[in-house]
Image: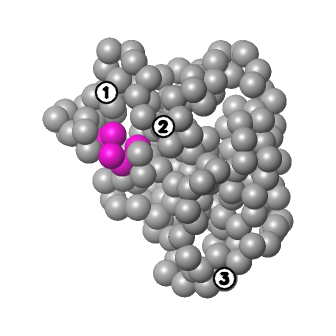
Amino acid sequence: MQIIGSQARPGSDISIKAKRCDMSKGYYFDYMMPCGRIGIAENGTGITHVLFSGQPLPGGYEKKESILIRLAASQLLAYFKGERRDFDLPLEPGGTDFQRDVWHAVMAIPYGQTQSYQAIAAGLGKEKASRAVGRANGLNPLPFMIPCHRVIGSNGALTGYAGGLALKKQLLDLEKGHLL
């Protein structure tokens, strides 16, 4: 998966940039997925949000199914069916430099595996920043595509997930070969 932008990590094909400031031309559309209702938003150049039912969409989006949103929905459905392990979409999650660094690290966690907040912080050279990593992970606007469900507590416990801990467990089980 690639996130389009200017913050490329050396040796990585992943890069991130902030969302365009003019969101007046963005679109969103809702779909019923195996995990429930999912909203997908884009700004004309990349997917900006994937929202669980009940999560508010930032302003400036018009309800319309674009080709990019339809492609994202198709890839999400294939993921839920166990037919796709990663996503091939332009992503524009925005965020601070630190958040984008965390999201890069999260995207590097292989399908079917997990990593702790503490390990991610250490990998970023900020051993004492596990809570900040947790906050950044919690602000991930692109769950599934930036697979924040793969991040767990250092004791192996499932912790926080915008879609709920039951869904987090289902996604981890899906990646171990158990369909939703």
44 is higher (above) or lower (below) than 161: below
Dot 2 amino acid type: Tyr
Q: Secondary structure at mark 3?
A: loop
Label 2 and label 3: CA atoms lie apart by: 29 Å
Boundaries of the magenta span: 133-137
Mark 2 nearby-residue class (10 Å; few <14, some 14–19, many ≥20): some
User: What amino acid does circle 3 point to?
Assistant: Lys
Q: Is residue 62 visible?
A: yes
Residue 161 shows which numbered tag?
2
- Would residue 39 appear left or right of 131 to someone viewing this image? right
* Nearer-the-camera pick, 54 or 139: 54
Label count reads: 3
Vertical comparison of 95 with 45: above or below: above
Q: Where does label 1 land, which residue?
A: 119
- Residue 9 covered by magenta stretch: no
How far apart are labels 3 and 1 at the CA level?
Answer: 39 Å
